[in-house]
Amino acid sequence: MISVIDYGIGNLGSIVNMLKKIGVGSKLISTPEEVGEAEKIILPGVGSFDNAVGLLSKLDLVAAIKDKANLGTPLLGICLGMQLLGTESEEGKLAGLNLIPGKIKRFPSLPGLKIPHMGWNSVKSEDQVLFKNMGDNRFYFVHTYYYAPESYDHSAGITSYGIAFTSYIKKDNIFGVQFHPEKSHNFGMQVLLNFSRVS
Amino acid sequence: MKRARVIPVLLLKGKGLYKTVKFRDERYVGDPINAVKIFNEKQCDELIFLDINASKYNTPINFRFIKDITSECFMPLAYGGGIDELDQIEKLLKIGIEKVVLNTVLFKNPLFLEKAAKQFGNSTIVASIDIRMNLFKQYQIYSHSNCEVKDISLSTFIKHAEEGGAGELMINSVDRDGMRSGYDLQLADKISRGLTIPTIFCGGCRDLSDIRNLLTTTETSAAAAGSIFVFKGPHKGVLISYPSPEEIEEIYN
């Protein structure tokens, strides 16, 4: 059973739909107690960094999520949810969860580079956890800011868009993907299926 | 490798799918949920649903129906039609819509765009503009919901949309709608080069090589079309279709 955090933002409907399609049970949670009981957690997110941190704090979820992750519970951050795993963001003033140290930066202004990065792009990865059984791939991205991990040990997948950036981060039981698996057809289904099998 | 998107635009009226010519002569083409299932199976890049009467006749958004549509979809879905309140956007996002398309409200309430972008994030908001050419071959902004031409400079308006926080701009060519006469590449080029945000261009798509021209000779980020995805043949028989992954590869080679 995967617990998807409902804190007022994020594509919850689509995540739950896709999990259902691949035969994985899920439920929406929004209290520290429910986080405490979760077997596996997905942290979605869309919109601005500070807004998301504010909403998580309001629901008293920041410490609960950090504690659970530090205890070894598998946690997957999606899109802004991945960025929340970092230390801080150029987009906002508030602190991230700092579960995988890194800074969130804005894409540079390059001639012809449209921002936000919106559309289908591929992830280059040798990872055998979320990317197990994944061949050539394409995923749907939509973001203006990207993750720069403090340690490249945590960079598990790279995507090219003007620059090469980390699109998949991993540290033990904690995972983050910049793309939207719930909007990426069978490629996304493979990622979510692999996450459901993480022990 | 990043590649530009190919997006079917589906027009909703009530619970039916329709296709127009020059924004008129609505013709019924089928059940939207069926169409979505087919596009989903064909692993379509993205879908845009526009309710063509919502603003014109002030009909409420049918959230339940939209939820039936989103539950069949594992690619991004954008919805537009009658959106002029923040809680409508919140509801739409909760039921699985990825992006909302704003059109009439850009004129009715110019501050709405900025409020919506701030609350939901720029990339959730698509500003959509319908463009028509007048007798003097000048491009003009047209509002189909009240059938009037707006006396606003096109370049000023699109810059405002970008500065107001739209994450994407969608252009609909009214004159070429349903005509299969080819995209207005000159217009697409002018608009896409003037903006940092991605642009979606719709209206007049003839075939896949037309899409290739749009995506390779202009800075347009996405080619949108209606007719080529819902009709087949010279007699316009209804057939829902989408290019295969190989055909899409061809566009870039």
Image: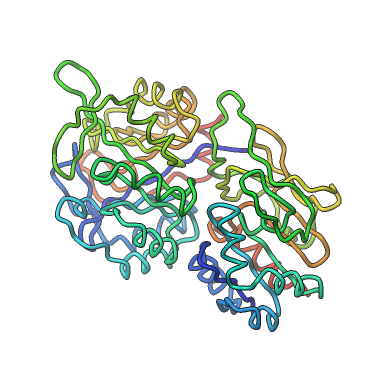
**Residue B239 seen in the current view:** no
The quarter of the picture where residue A60 lies is bottom right
On the image, the x and y values in percent for residue A26 come to 58, 77
Instruction: Count how many numbered circles sit on residues in the image.
Output: 0
Q: Is residue B39 visible in the rendered structure shown here?
A: yes
Q: Residue furthest top?
A: B136
Q: Residue at x 14, y 19 (%)?
A: B135
Its colouring scheme is rainbow
Quadrant of the rendered image containing residue B96 = bottom left
Left or right of residue B7: residue A195: right
Q: Residue at (73%, 58%) from the top-left corner?
A: A131
Residue B233 percent location from the top left of the image: 27, 41
Name the spot of residue A32 as percent of width and height, x first. 65, 78
Q: Is residue A97 left or right of residue B8?
A: right
User: At 38% from the left edge and 52% from the top edge, which residue is drawn?
Assistant: B100
Q: Dividing the image into 4 quarters, which one contains the N terminus of chain A?
A: bottom right
Along the horizontal axis of the image, is A80 left or right of A65?
Answer: left
- Quarter of the figure with the C terminus of chain A: bottom right
Comparing B131 with B27, the one in front is B131
Q: Measured from the top left, where is residue B180 in percent x and y?
A: 27, 33
Q: Is residue A196 left or right of residue B226?
A: right
Determine which quarter of the picture holds residue B152: top left
Judge whether A24 appears above or below B32 on screen.
below
Asked whether B101 or A199 is in front, the reply is B101
